[in-house]
Amino acid sequence: MTLSAILLFIFSLFGDSLLDRISPQEVTLLFAGDAMQHKPQCDAALQKDGSYDFNHCFEPIAPYVKSADYAVVNLETPLAGKPYSGYPCFCAPDSYAAALKNAGFDMCMTANNHTLDRRDKGLRRTIKVLDSLKIDHLGTYSNKAEREHNLPYIKNIKGIRVGFLNYTYGTNGIPVQGDVVVDFIDKKQMAHDIEQLRMSGADIITVVIHWGVEYVMLPNAEQKQLADFLCKQGVDLIIGGHPHVIQPMEIRHNDEYDKDCLVVYSLGNFISNQKKRDTKGGAMVEVTVQRDLGGRVHLKAADYSLVFCQQPQNGSRLYKVVPVEECEAPWKAMCNEFESSAMKILDKHNINVNRKSAAIYSESKN
């Protein structure tokens, strides 16, 4: 029997299942920016029965979020119970997190400068609410024992073990008052946590980090230095937030580990009531990681989409996050201004991270 005949016989027995076994394994990860909840957003979500419904905010973007194998967002508000509030000390209804889950987000990062807006009690309640909703979360802990139990945090996504960490530069000067734990940026601690992930078998290491200067569209020296440090530690994905505006993205090669490292300095706002042009939207980054036929997992590609938050206008009370390609009147002109400003930065400074085409984006809705 010839070799070709043998192969035909094998494929007749196993068909597509054999192809699946020998094809490279891939996972898509999606990262969105700061999910803020200012008081007008809360007021707009109030229903006649006294409940709060935020689902409409994310319906236009939900098909894209759900198309990823695992989606992550920065939850930049405590879920501390009534009274609800916006800037400067945030507190959102529990249904806000439920709406993020309904939109397809699997994980909420909680280490940011507003995590202690309702002090230790608010931090603890936020964790309990996310647990009750079965939303993965990372970055804050009810106590040291809980942190030690939860870390190293590795999520098995379609057979690829993705490790996650989350840190913040600070908490707006509000100190921890009891035994809760907030993961602050600390190189010694980060190096230890990264090594623990590696030793525990993580195929890919992701660090989501709250850093930088608000409203500045280029990274500062401290961000660049921290990015260099994390890449040298063997981190594969570095996803930044806090500036409330987009900042550049790059894929660089790590010679020591012989692999690529993605650095996203800031995804900007996912949803908010901020009014300045560059704060009205942000980016979502889609990352593809692949296990090759030799068993090694590596970053295959990363691209981004731009989203815009349509705020109440001309009688509308609704907030809606939409792809910039789908902005509606009367928001279209503002959306175009946001997009133009963002693209000037990204086209000039991005390295090996390209924009996801509208045609590709639309496929997630079909």
Image (tube, rainbow, N blue to C red):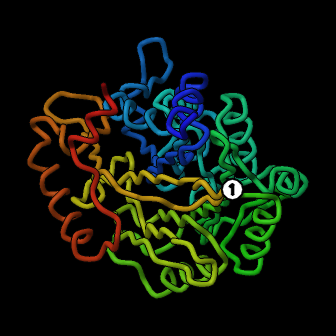
Look at the numbered disc 1 and give the secondary structure of its residue: strand
- Front residue of 33/249: it is 249
Q: Is residue 72 left or right of residue 355?
A: right
Coordinates of residue 157 in the picture (x, y in percent): 64, 42
- Front residue of 171/263: it is 263
User: Height in image: 212 above or below 31?
Assistant: below
Residue sitting at x 60%, y 54%: 293
Residue with the most extreme top position: 49
User: Height in image: 334 above or below 65?
Assistant: below
Q: Is residue 24 visible?
A: yes
Q: Residues within 10 Å of mark 1 (few under 14, many from 20)?
A: many
Q: Is residue 52 left or right of residue 366?
A: right
Coordinates of residue 325 in the picture (x, y in percent): 18, 42
Coordinates of residue 344 in the picture (x, y in percent): 18, 70
Residue with the most extreme front position: 1
Residue wearing tag 1: 163
Q: Residue 232, located in which quarter of the rendered image?
A: bottom right
Residue sitting at x 87%, y 51%: 149
Q: Residue 173, located in which quarter of the rendered image?
A: bottom right
Q: Is residue 162 left or right of residue 153?
A: left
Coordinates of residue 55 in the picture (x, y in percent): 42, 26
- Front residue of 329/227: it is 227
